[in-house]
Image (cartoon, rainbow, N blue to C red):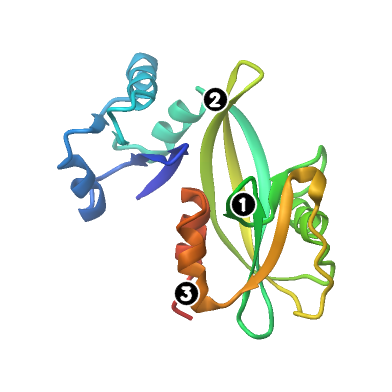
Amino acid sequence: MYITVYFDDKPVFLCDSLDETLNEYLHHPDTVFIDEISNSAIKSLLHEIADPAFHAGVLQHASFDALKKAFFKQFTPIAAGGGLVMNETGQLLMMQRRGKWDLPKGKCDEGESIVECALREVSEETGVHNLKIIRALAPTYHTYHAYGKHMLKTTSWFLMQATSDEVLTPQTEEDITALEWVSKHAIPEKMKESFKTIEAVIQQSGILSA
């Protein structure tokens, strides 16, 4: 098994074995490969992946749980929730934020469950209130720097349902400039102007093949 942690658009794969996808990455000379979980080895990968010359990293260990624990402790954890909101015609609610097409999501408040967080963030960012959770989706992971610290945000995603007659109200204080119900055939074009984490959650959700 493996998970993907994004450093901007660069993927770092944490895995307990190598499959066809990961072997494909390892064929490229600009992929960093490390097969131990010492602090020095992980810090070396984090240093190398910041180099523009490298575009991916693979970190392998027989114990996936031990690997994930060793990797994640290098970061300050942030929990977030978000939603893929579909309407009755099969359209996906997407937003434009800072020049990118995005999905509604945000950090959890203290004492808030991840489900409560996801529903609140979707409502606040889009103005949609009558939401129904259909099922949980796989989380996404990405890193960033803030306040002099290395942050790792885990976003828990949920497939949600709403109706197209909801009044869409972009949360402008969060730099959301547009909201749009996007038909299935138009989603791939929007994904070209999105983030790798957003592309990943849409792909794994199965909505494009449904």
Q: Name the residue under label 2.
A: 75
Give left or right: position of 172 versus 142: right
In x, y percent, where is residue 48? 32, 22
Looking at the image, tell me whether mark 3 or mark 2 is earlier in sequence order: 2
**Residue 208 shows which numbered tag?**
3
Residue 40, image quadrant? top left
Q: Is mark 1 on a helix, strand or loop?
A: strand
- Whether residue 127 is situated above or below residue 86 in the rendered picture: above
Residue 46: image location, x then y, percent:
39, 23
Residue 137, above or below 43: below
Which image quarter: residue 80? top right
Asked which quadrant contains residue 124, the reply is bottom right
Front-lying residue, 84 or 20: 84
What residue lies at 50% left-to-right and 49% top-to-bottom? 195
**Residue type of the residue flagged with mark 2:** Phe
In front of the other: label 3 or label 2? Answer: 3
Residue displayed at 43% across by 41% down? 9
Crowd around label 1: few <14 · some 14–19 · many ≥20 (10 Å) = many
Circle 1/circle 2 CB separation < 8 Å: no
Q: How far apart are marks 1 and 3 (CA)?
A: 20 Å
Residue 173 position (above or below residue 126) = above
* Labels 1 and 2: the sequence-earlier one: 2
Looking at the rendered structure, the secondary structure element under dot 2 is: loop
Q: Is there any visible trace of residue 207 in the rendered image?
A: no
Q: How crowded is mark 3: few (under 14 residues within 10 Å), some or many (20 or more)?
A: some
Kind of residue at disc 3: Leu
Location of mark 1 (residue): 156
**Is there a contact, CB below 8 Å, between mark 3 and mark 2?**
no
Q: Distance between the residues labelled 1 and 2?
A: 18 Å
